Amino acid sequence: MKAPRHHFAPGTLQQMPTRTQRLRVTLGVALWFCAIAIGVVVSIMWRGAL
């Protein structure tokens, strides 16, 4: 399934994939950092509570 090209201008068609990939990568990295930070905070809180 290829998206119809007539919806995109010739200049934006080449730039769109890299932008979406960068956005996905940055979002993924941010989510990983948040998950690790939350895990560290929870473990520290558990150690302090116990």
Image: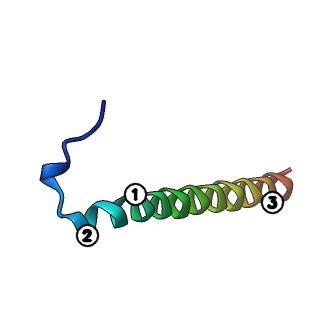
* Circle on res. 39: none
Q: In which quarter of the image is the N terminus?
A: top left
Q: In this view, does 10 lie to the left or right of 26?
A: left
Number of callouts in the render? 3
Q: Give the quarter of the image for residue 38.
A: bottom right
Residue on which the image places disc 1: 17
Q: Which of 43 and 7 is in front in this view?
A: 7
Q: Which amino acid does label 1 sit on?
A: Pro
Q: Earlier in the sequence, mark 1 or mark 2?
A: 2
Foreground mark, 3 or 2, reads 2
Q: How crowded is mark 3: few (under 14 residues within 10 Å), some or many (20 or more)?
A: few
Q: Residues within 10 Å of mark 1 (few under 14, many from 20)?
A: few
Which residue is at 19% across, 42% downward? Answer: 4
Q: Is residue 1 above or below residue 8?
A: above
Residue on which the image places disc 3: 44
Foreground mark, 1 or 2, reads 2
Q: Is residue 15 above or below residue 42?
A: below
Which residue is at 41% across, 65% downward? Answer: 19
Residue on which the image places disc 2: 11
Element on which disc 3 rests: helix
- State the separation of the CA atoms marked 3 and 2: 50 Å
Q: Earlier in the sequence, mark 3 or mark 1?
A: 1
Element on which disc 1 rests: helix
Foreground mark, 3 or 1, reads 1
Q: Which amino acid does label 2 sit on?
A: Gly
Which residue is at 83% across, 59% downward? Answer: 48
Q: Where is residue 9 in the image (x, y as percent from the top left)?
A: 17, 63
